[in-house]
Amino acid sequence: MATWGYPDGALFYRRLDRRIPMAVGADGSYLIDADGKRYLDAAGGAVVANLGHSLPEIAEAVAAEIRSLGYVNGTQMTCRAAEELAAELARVLPGELRYSYFLASGSEAVEAAVKLARQVQLERGRPGRWKVISRVPSYHGNTLTALSLSGREHYRKVFAPLLTDFPRIPAPDPYRRPDDPRTTGELVEEEILRQGPESVAAFLCEPIVGASAGAVVPPREYYERAAEACRRHGVLLIADEVLTGMGRTGRWFASEHFDLAPDLLVFGKGVNAGAVPLSGLAATPAIVETLAAGSGYFNHAQTYSHHPATCAAGLAVVRHLRRERLVERCAELETAFFAALRPLAEHPWVGDVRGKGFLAGVELVADRATREPWPRERRLAERWTEAAFARGLIVWPNVGHVDGERGDLILLAPPLTASLDELAEIGRLLRRSLEDIS
Ligand code: PLP
């Protein structure tokens, strides 16, 4: 098999210790390498390719926008693609969210949301509020503030001296600790009070915890309590829906499963379906009115904010999702997807299969009764992922969710367009590749 890797050529590979095939084409849910081998993409890359790969209508929308406008700076002029995408999103955003601010990556949209929360608190006459409470495990991105807010210890270790020391509380873990206060949401208020409400600007959470914990769905009560605590203490609630947004969990946004009405919501990945870098944040009228009545602007501009070509891609994605009823389809096929994964649960290493819509986490444990994780040296998540890849199945591994070091799981996020046969094939290949390493 032809492979590429360091020190070939001049590309700075993300992994210097292994060789990888080259993708040369795509066909719906499949990627095709230079040898013609087909890979069923059960992770959408990194939970991005929600419409499968290489959708012609996105390509055409982007090309048309580049031909007609190319670049427009959002401080000088607006453009139709950005206006229409914001209007489309306003129809489906949860709660009162209405105004969208477009950026390029999930990390920078998280940072922008944190800056906006701080600016709003300041303009509301609360200058002491700057802290953002987040959770462990969690993942909010790899830029420094997003990483500071993330609970993924192996990503943070090297950069520890560069990180801001934000308060972080344990994330809910219904599998290991169903009745623990961390799962019932009590910890949010406790932490606000511990920090002193007058110092806290926002609480940041992934409503369904994505890659870092493997599709953990907290009980409804968690968010009822968390939202109530935020309201009571003047803390803004930021939902990070970079991974869960745009239909991935069977609703447009995962917040809807909990009737969560955030003040700010961050989106990415699914809004561009992988075609171009597009992300954004959405804010309620109350947030934007604060700035309008105060400084008159959001103190955060980037060259590619409100970019016409990326917004054109987003618009094509949203219209496709709506026209093909893919969000509804995802909810309807959730049962079929989890039925395809059910045989996995018979394997003695599989502790939990969980998730929502087309987002699933499969957790491996050494002991099903005690839920004890495997020792890290066994590298089970990585080995399962490699075995699956050899069989032509792409999945997303994660390690360390149990205690920062131990914990093996894989995340599945097939395209919302995946056929029933493809869902069944994912279940079969997962089972076979787990047997390969058992
Ligand atoms: N937030 C969540 C929940 C994510 O899953 C990710 C990426 O995986 C990010 C933020 C960061 O997004 P990006 O990698 O586009 O910067």
Image (cartoon, helix red, strand yellow):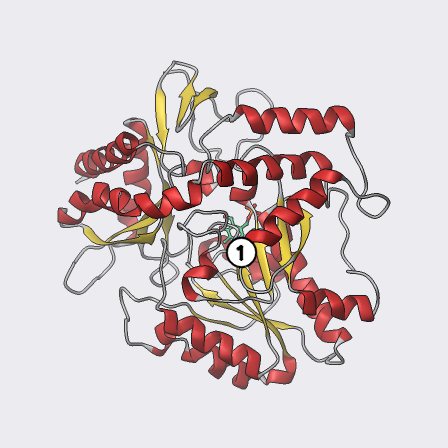
Relative placement, left or right, of 22 versus 11 is: left
User: Residue at the location (53% across, 60% down)?
Assistant: 94
Relative placement, left or right, of 135 versus 118 is: left
Where in the figure is residue 147, as x and y percent of width and height? 56, 57
Where in the figure is residue 57, as x and y percent of width and height? 56, 26
Where in the figure is residue 156, as x and y percent of width and height? 52, 57
Query: Residue placed farthest to the right in the image?
Result: 76
Relative placement, left or right, of 283 versus 35 is: right
Where on the picture, by quarter, is residue 121? bottom right
User: For the C terminus, which image quadrant?
Assistant: top left
Q: Is residue 424 visible?
A: yes
Amino acid under label 1? His
Where on the picture, by quarter, is residue 289? bottom right
Q: Is residue 152 visible?
A: no
For this rendering, which residue is in front, 190 or 286? 286
User: Residue at the location (55% across, 66% down)?
Assistant: 262
Disc 1 within 8 angstroms of ligand 1 (CB): yes
Question: Which residue matches tag 1?
Answer: 140
Crowding near the residue tagged with mark 1, few <14, some 14–19, many ≥20 C-alpha atoms within 10 Å: many
User: Residue at the location (43% across, 15% down)?
Assistant: 34
For this rendering, which residue is in front, 331 or 132? 331
